[in-house]
């Protein structure tokens, strides 16, 4: 799953029609907490509050030009991918139907509807919602959009180019891993630029499928993914994503649920930026490797800020939410 510089530049042109580069800041208090110079890439400041919108815009733009008969899209999500497709489809005047699992975030559901999505609730988790959504295309006369696709990867890769442009050479970047577009986009840009930066994926111990796959060198699945970090609640990784991660990442860390909740508190305290759970899990990974990165120049990807008020209240009270 690679892309060329020309493809990255075209994706950037598409994204720029909707918003400019998101900020990347080196926060002194966060650096003091970690013992390193720490840059944060604030993907919580896109029009949908998360990095995924970049991929949705590129996917829909290519479909509009190369498959003009497409009337709209159907896909599954826990939230940010669905907001991305809804935002991009509405901008193109197309339909977006999004399948979410039972018990999905009410705030993210409301946000998707706000961007024009039609929601269907199906399945006990993302995997079941995903399988159902992929079978709806013919019935609804819509194009099924997978969770991992070259257009999604090169779209979200635009954040990585912005990060390296702002921060310069970095020793390591820590990135959350759900279905893999974010980390694969980061690896692709790192390689295009010829950098030696380590790319470190971070997942939850409660949803370790990608970490297990990385160690095994091939896909490993889990029967459940009971994490409150809904953006990384993956129990069946995509083979193409695993292949790219195995070849390009330095390691994939699995952090405890408590560590993700603490990372949310640290992010708020040191940057005053609201993270959703997946938006802080990269920081949880970095905090687990303080000794390793002492004195280094590192970055974390704040992938989104779409946090339910109920989750935030628990975290700020010092608790770890249950999924």
Image (cartoon, rainbow, N blue to C red):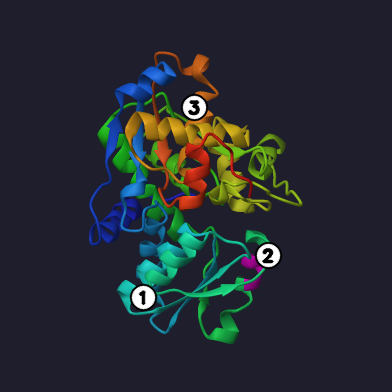
Q: Residue at x 63, y 65 (%)?
A: 102
Q: Nearer the viewer, mark 3 or mark 1?
A: 3
* Vertical comparison of 39 with 117: above or below: above
In the image, 95 versus 146, the foreground residue is 95
219 left or right, relative to 266: right
Q: Residue at x 42, y 45 (%)?
A: 303
Q: Residue at x 65, y 38 (%)?
A: 211
Number of numbered labels in the structure image: 3
Residue range corresponding to the magenta coloring: 128-132
Q: Position of residue 61 (x, y in %)?
A: 35, 69
Circles 3 and 1: CB atoms closer than 8 Å? no
Please check the rendered image and state whether residue 184 is part of the magenta-colored stretch, yes or no: no
Circles 2 and 1: CB atoms closer than 8 Å? no
Q: Which residue matches tag 1? A: 64
Q: Which residue matches tag 2? A: 128
Q: Which residue matches tag 3? A: 286
Q: Position of residue 210 (x, y in %)?
A: 64, 43
In the image, 172 versus 316, the foreground residue is 316
277 left or right, relative to 31: right
Q: Position of residue 59 (x, y in %)?
A: 41, 65
Query: Crowding at label 3, few (<14), some or many (≥20) Cα neighbours within 10 Å?
Result: many
Q: CA distance from mark 3 to mark 1?
A: 40 Å
């Amino acid at each position: 799953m690679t892309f060329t510089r020309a493809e990255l530049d075209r994706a950037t042109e598409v994204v720029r029609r909707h918003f400019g580069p998101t900020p990347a800041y080196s926060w002194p208090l966060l650096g003091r907490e970690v013992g390193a110079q720490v840059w944060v890439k604030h993907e919580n400041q896109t029009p949908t509050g998360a990095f995924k919108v970049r991929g949705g815009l590129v996917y829909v733009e290519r479909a509009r030009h190369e498959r003009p008969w497409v009337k709209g899209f159907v896909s599954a999500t826990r939230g940010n991918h669905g907001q991305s497709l809804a935002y991009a489809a509405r901008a193109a005047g197309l339909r977006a139907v999004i399948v979410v699992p039972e018990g999905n975030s009410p705030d993210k559901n409301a946000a998707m509807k706000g961007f024009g999505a039609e929601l269907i609730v199906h399945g006990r988790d993302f995997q079941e919602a995903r399988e159902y959504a992929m079978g709806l295309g013919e019935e609804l006369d819509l194009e099924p959009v997978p969770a991992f696709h070259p257009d999604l990867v090169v779209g979200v890769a635009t954040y990585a180019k912005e990060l390296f442009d702002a921060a310069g050479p970095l020793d390591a970047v820590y990135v959350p891993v759900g279905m893999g577009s974010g980390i694969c986009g980061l690896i692709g840009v790192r390689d295009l630029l010829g950098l030696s930066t380590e790319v470190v994926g971070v997942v939850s111990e409660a949803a370790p499928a990608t970490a297990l796959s990385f160690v095994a060198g091939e896909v490993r699945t889990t029967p459940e993914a009971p994490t409150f970090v809904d953006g990384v609640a993956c129990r069946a990784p995509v083979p193409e994503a695993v292949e790219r991660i195995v070849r390009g990442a330095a390691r994939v860390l699995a952090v405890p649920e408590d560590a993700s909740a603490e990372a949310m508190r640290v992010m708020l305290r040191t940057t005053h930026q609201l993270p959703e759970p997946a938006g802080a899990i990269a920081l949880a990974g970095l905090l687990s490797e303080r000794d390793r990165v002492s004195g280094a120049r590192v970055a974390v990807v704040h992938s989104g800020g779409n946090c339910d008020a109920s989750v935030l209240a628990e975290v700020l009270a010092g608790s770890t939410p249950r999924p």
